[in-house]
Amino acid sequence: MNVEEIKSRLSRLESLHSAFENKFPAIYGERDREALLETVKALHTVSREKLEVAAGLYREMSGVGGYAEVQAKELYRNEHQMKFRLEELLSLLSRDDYDSRVKLETAMERLVQFHRVYDYAVRKALGELTSEVEGMALLAGGEKEKKVPAGIMEELRKVKTLEAELGTLKRFLLRLYTHPGDVHKVEAALRDWHSRGLLWVEARNVEKLSGVADAGEILEGLTLIGVVEKKMRGGEGVYRHRSYSPG
């Protein structure tokens, strides 16, 4: 495992993600079809490179295993999904028939909804991977291919996880204090989905129903204080309110 190569890939991904996020707002409210097509093309170019770098990173992390591999897989999954959604738009924008125009609005809505989860998920995965790699670099002592003891890496991972959870809890408590209504709306939306027969709910569905931006962060906070349960499904977190009983 080449730690410096992995750090270089992470740095490149962070740079590309910043460039992508700077370009993305241009799609909002764009009425000119040609201008929208050029914007989506530019986003797709960046997305394609991001996926290529993420794929290389995932291959590197597969040799490490554990938490690092899980985060690399999550990063790759999100980049693959974004590229797919942009290609869907490009396909529709390249045609000007009635059916394509009708489908375009739905595809745009799906892209915007996914992006709300995507930015947070990518930044979180990059942050977690950076912490993991910094630990590897520290323990490797400058040796490019040194194998880090699994027990030590596991303890470092636990510390980093606690740090991340503390940060999440701080942001949640601040939001609870400054915007308590957001928290109540998220809880109500989660229960509403349960009442419709959905036992485990994705963050983007809660956000869509509640109208609260970054509902995923609130759900993470509610999970930490024991109000909500979380599990992973298909590489994505899903949530259930503890007060809900399917009967």
Image (tube, rainbow, N blue to C red):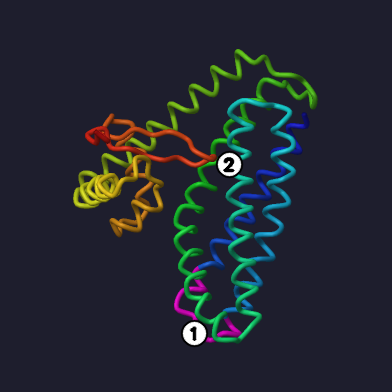
Locate the N terminus and report the quarter of the image it occupies: top right
Please say if 161 is above or below 212.
above
Q: Which mark is residue 143?
A: none
Instruction: Out of 15 and 88, give the one closest to the viewer.
Output: 88
Residue 129 image offset from top left, x and y in percent: 60, 36
Residue 188 placement (x, y as % from top left):
22, 48
Quadrant in the picture for the C terminus = top left
Q: Residues within 10 Å of mark 1 (few under 14, many from 20)?
A: few
Identify the element where label 2 is drawn: helix
Query: Residue drawn at (71%, 57%), measured in percent from left and top?
Result: 49
**Cα distance in 3D space between marks 2 and 1:** 33 Å
Secondary structure category for the residue under label 1: loop
Of all residues shown, which one is farthest toward the front?
247
> Residue, x 59% and y 33% (percent of image)?
70
Count all numbered tags in the image, as a single digit: 2
Image location (x, y in percent) of residue 99: 55, 81
Q: Which residues are magenta?
A: 25-35
Question: Circle 1 is placed at which residue position?
Answer: 31
Q: Is residue 29 magenta?
A: yes
Check disc 2: other Cα within 10 Å, few if <14, some if 14-19, many if 20+.
many
Q: What residue do we see at 37% from left, 40% from top?
A: 200
Q: Which mark is residue 74?
A: 2
Q: Position of residue 20 (x, y in %)?
A: 59, 62
Q: Earlier in the sequence, mark 2 or mark 1?
A: 1
> Where is 137 relative to 175, above or below?
above
Question: In the image, is 85 to the left or to the right of 142?
Answer: left
In the rendered structure, the answer to whether residue 104 lies left or right of residue 239 reads right
The residue nearer to you, when weighing 191 against 141, is: 191
Residue in the image at 46% along x and 52% along y? 117
- What amino acid type is highlighted by mark number 2? Glu
State the residue in front, 135 or 243: 243
Q: Amino acid at mark 1?
A: Arg
